[in-house]
Amino acid sequence: MNIRFTLPLLCALLCQYTSLSAQLQWREVMPGVWKGTAGTPEKVTLLNIAAAKPDSAALGKLPSARFPLDRNDISVKLADGKVYLRFPLEKNEQLFGLGLNFKTVNQRGRVSQLHVDHYGGKDDGRTHAPVPLYISSRGYGVLVDAARYITVYAGTAVRTDTKNPPVLHDRNGNKQWESQPYSDAVEMLVPAAGAEVYIFAGPTAMNAVQRYNLFNGGGYLPPKWGLGFTQRVPTLYSQQDIVREAKEFEGHNFPLDFIGVEPGWHSMAYPCTFEWDPNRFPDPKGFIINLANMGVKANLWLNPYVSPKSSLYAPLKSLSGSHTVWNGLVADFTLPEAKALFREHFLKNHIALGVSGYKMDENDGYDKWLWPDVATFPSGTSAEQMRQIYGIAMQQMTDEWFREQNRRTYGLVRASNAGASRFPYVIYNDYYSHPDFITALVNSSFIGVLWTPEVRASKSAEEWVRRMQSVCFSPMAMLNAWADGTKPWSFPEVETAVQEVAMLRMQLLPYLYSTFAQYRFEGKPPFRSMNLIDGFAFTPQVNGGKLDATLNPYEAKTRSELKDQYMMGDNMIVAPFFAGDSSRKVYLPKGKWYDFYTGELAGEDGVITVKARLDRIPLFIRDGGLIPMIPPRRQAPKPGEVLPLEVRVYGSAPGDFLLYDDDGNTFDFERGQFTRVLLKAANGKGSMEKPAAGKPFGYGPKVKWTFMTAQAK
Amino acid sequence: MNIRFTLPLLCALLCQYTSLSAQLQWREVMPGVWKGTAGTPEKVTLLNIAAAKPDSAALGKLPSARFPLDRNDISVKLADGKVYLRFPLEKNEQLFGLGLNFKTVNQRGRVSQLHVDHYGGKDDGRTHAPVPLYISSRGYGVLVDAARYITVYAGTAVRTDTKNPPVLHDRNGNKQWESQPYSDAVEMLVPAAGAEVYIFAGPTAMNAVQRYNLFNGGGYLPPKWGLGFTQRVPTLYSQQDIVREAKEFEGHNFPLDFIGVEPGWHSMAYPCTFEWDPNRFPDPKGFIINLANMGVKANLWLNPYVSPKSSLYAPLKSLSGSHTVWNGLVADFTLPEAKALFREHFLKNHIALGVSGYKMDENDGYDKWLWPDVATFPSGTSAEQMRQIYGIAMQQMTDEWFREQNRRTYGLVRASNAGASRFPYVIYNDYYSHPDFITALVNSSFIGVLWTPEVRASKSAEEWVRRMQSVCFSPMAMLNAWADGTKPWSFPEVETAVQEVAMLRMQLLPYLYSTFAQYRFEGKPPFRSMNLIDGFAFTPQVNGGKLDATLNPYEAKTRSELKDQYMMGDNMIVAPFFAGDSSRKVYLPKGKWYDFYTGELAGEDGVITVKARLDRIPLFIRDGGLIPMIPPRRQAPKPGEVLPLEVRVYGSAPGDFLLYDDDGNTFDFERGQFTRVLLKAANGKGSMEKPAAGKPFGYGPKVKWTFMTAQAK
């Protein structure tokens, strides 16, 4: 036995095992952001790995706000080697966030153990991005920065000595009895010697989200091509197959900005070599150039597990964990030496050739496929911590490589966590429920991540067009044909409808890119839950539990949720249809809302019912909403291109829109190389501010103003 | 801050945080039972709470055995405040146990986090009895005695430096690739400063189970009435309603030995007062006497949560946890003072009146219903520990009350764990899949618990009779009508078939009681997985994973399992039918097997197909198998009754059977007041040993020998 200890360590140990109750001391570390430290926090935390610098200037521009809770109502205790946290809740408060959930939006009344995992069909905290952050409908957020499996009781735990006890009912004959009595607190158990806790003030829920994102450096602004269409090809496609695939897209006049190259590019994959297969890819450089000549970029699939056949294996062996995944090494990405080996290899073999980015698969995974919690790592980071951070560590590392090149990347990742908003990655998974994919898109907006409801296959043309429609209104418009070999035109009866919605996404690029600029500079998520929207109110209906000895012995109540519509940017509600729907309800925030396609009044303040049309995804624009658009095109504009701008104007209220543009490819915008002009419309007239000269701006001076709504007489 | 520490504590703390690898030191604590201590074990462990005394005499009678593993292949490490354990596996070894699973029997290749919980439909370690014990097909068992959420990698984790690495396959085109590469170890993570580990030797898997059960004091021998039929009545039934119900059973000539009184007997339930409701039960004593006059006993439902309306509330408040469940106190049952308060109240108000036992509900429960892991308890026991032990603490406590009275009880419990075999409780739950209920019955045999596939309701007469048939071949023949008000005769078209199978159970009491005596004295579970049977072999079929991007992206393989048949005692295979089945397969161990009803040869060494008959549950008896029976009757024999014995003999091989009897009600058998006589049959002749005089023996000297199988010429 070799025992070394220092005084601080000793103190940490003791604090951990002696039950201590205390108040957190709060320090305002950024405008409207407070930090409190419980016990002795660990070195490896989510935010430490994400390594973000807060955007203090942008934070300073948000409305000023006071500490949003009563400090006396927050308690912390150290016992059993863990941190016990308690935060107050008010009677009608709703809670959002707590990871990328697929079935629920409102988290109050739920228990989660936050755990990076494949989503397994249940909202229980095991998901691709189990971010330990909740956003309250009262306009604040709480983040626990610990890379541990945190258990969260979101308004379920009831203390014996609570000030707001639930009403006592006798289940013997009293119908008021509830299986989940009222709880006035969020309680969390952090299995660590300490944790840092952050409170993000509002005053609105959107402001709290913005503060969270800006505290982590703001959102990511993708390159323009990243917002175009992407197709992922079958696993074993060769470079010729892929070039042929890109040509087919030309032939079908279907948008295509980048292609996803699946495992077959590796000389061995599962585990991976990260080296080009000489048979399928005899000339990687020529392959990338061929694609580039068609305006198409290449994104490479990988999972992190290093094959014994890889040149990286030998040098990485001592820098990797005690256990393998699929026979591959699990590199310890908390070690700079391990990261340096990857950097050198990836820059030289992929990025220098023009590879545009990566799809980083399986940095999450079901327990039976991932490294076990009994694994150890050379840095001393525990397997549990490694699991919670692996996705963000890979995002941080790869993001840095591209920033070094002054090239923006945009890719895919399956595991994420807190601190990820500034990273160039969109989350996806293997699950495939279309409605649940939309709920994930809704939930992504609370926790600083992006999500794509990717399309892979469908049972019918109807399902196909419905899925294609919603993926075109998401952060990444992707068809992932790795296993099925599907093409956008795989269902000929809906080929036109699919092409039209993909083209519509391309037309909306000015709107979408400006929306992502908001994410970057203001921290507003591009795709937003209705719960973050001013003037929106949805009161969940509680459906009383009917006793059924088999199906509902506890007479548990259910609560309706709004989880199938969202906003893209400030002005547009997206309300997807799912296969089989003939009509659907759409909940409108305060004010008048207009049909995107016709400009007609769709409704005002409340619920409307929309009839299904196979060729359209329902879109609604707010009164005074401006939607800047460009003509249909297959690919995102290149730097220097100047395009005609059409601005559609909806309703009769005066409105404006901040149009953003830059070179679309580099980080020069961070050094001032961008343009932001105000578009204004009122009384049937529109105007655009004159852009400053010498900065990138891709639109001609003559704007076509289209007033979509017949003006009131 | 108030920090106290002692040198041993300091040492424990340091050991915990310094990564230490070591070998476990093994000490043979009982014949064939070795104990190893990792780190500093906690005071509150599963076996400490169960407080069993090993039956050293019975252990000594098992075949002698050596330490079943290579000590060098077992490793233990202390790191991150946890215990890391590793045990070797051989290539074709199968693993059983690891909690009361409902869908799987073979646990190799699975990951579980053992956690007392309502079963939620997935075998993931969250179940009513998450016993940290596995039984190997190689004939040994491993138990980790820690009241913590233990994570078990049962042949899934693969070490980089393993001596038996999996074969490396390239998923790019190689069909041999496997989503779960071969692993040669069980690894476990115990989130505690230490743990005690026990190894139970064989040489057979059954011997390992026996050693485990005997180490915990042997199995429980129920009172005879406990093996009769039981009906649980609707929640709000009054004492008159219940007496009427018992009379109806007489009218229908349907067996009934005890009645389950559901929540309505409490003056308030959910949370509970444990006090009789004066309106529904104005005369509890008279009520119990009325039932007793019909030969029927009363079992009282409860959950442990103490209502503010209970006289127990005030004295228990300071002896309870920080959080309530359903507004009720959660008593700290690791405190003798809390147990004493319950004892006094329960003895005086129930047991003294003649109450025969309890149904202890909801000492498990979904996270959202139970106390949270952030709860604290006055003893210092953590919420996690309390959750793992609550069921066994309640079993231990109540068992003691009845032993004090020299009265055997037999009841129900929903939470259990290691060390429970000697307790008078059968596990049940709210789940209701008939096939999965049978799988649970199979699995109960590995982990020292009893399970009943209770009947509540059915969608059809066919389902009704199928469920009634299998519950009559289980540890407790129960209809639980708390919510549905069903009666055994609820489906008139199958009333006779249901009555017949209930009567058949009564006829089989001599066989069943002797089988439970085996459980008590030899540790052999009364209901047994085929995997524990000598001469049985079932090789799981592996079905190769077909790639499907949506349903099976990892081409995961599935493995067939034998999980729908079991043995009752030494001689009888039970192979239930489920609604909808027209035929089924039955796997026979080595030798010839005979139809119970006809005595005809059913098959030999292998699979047979049996056609469904609505009025019969398939039962098969081994060659030379003796089945002692009594005439059909409604209630179990009372002490002093003398019954005619019929012994059915199957096949042509000579056979014998050890018939056990005692007074059926008290613990006098533990002081020698029992009879055990050998029944023998060969060549068409049978004989019974003469029982010693002066000891209880409920059968007349003249045995009717029925040779069921036509003897070979």
Image (cartoon, coloured by chain):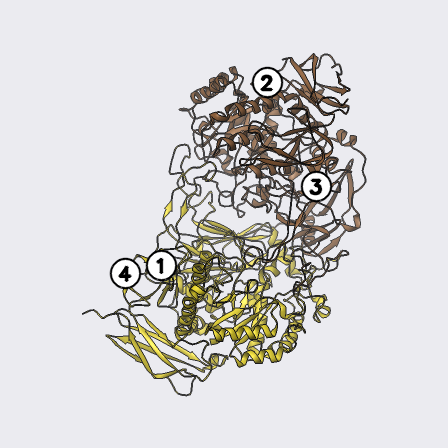
Chain colours: A yellow, B brown
Residue at mark 4: A604
What is the x, y in percent for residue B153? 66, 50
Q: Do labels 2 and 1 share a chain?
A: no
Q: Which of B592 and A373 is in front in this view?
A: B592
Q: In which quarter of the image is the N terminus of chain A?
A: bottom right
Mark 1: amino acid: Ala
Q: Are marks 3 and 4 on the same chain?
A: no
Whether residue A54 is visible, yes or no, is no
Q: Which of A20 and A342 is in front in this view?
A: A342
Which numbered disc covers residue B538? 3
Chain name for mark 3: B
Residue at mark 1: A612
What is the x, y in percent for residue A31? 43, 68
Q: Are marks 1 and 3 on the same chain?
A: no
Mark nearer the viewer, 4 or 1: 1
Give the SS element for disc 2: loop
Q: Which of marks 2 and 3 is nearer the N terminus?
A: 3
What is the x, y in percent for residue B20? 72, 55
Q: Is residue B627 left or right of residue A74?
A: right
Mark nearer the viewer, 2 or 4: 2
Mark 2: amino acid: Pro
Residue at mark 2: B632
Mark 4: amino acid: Glu
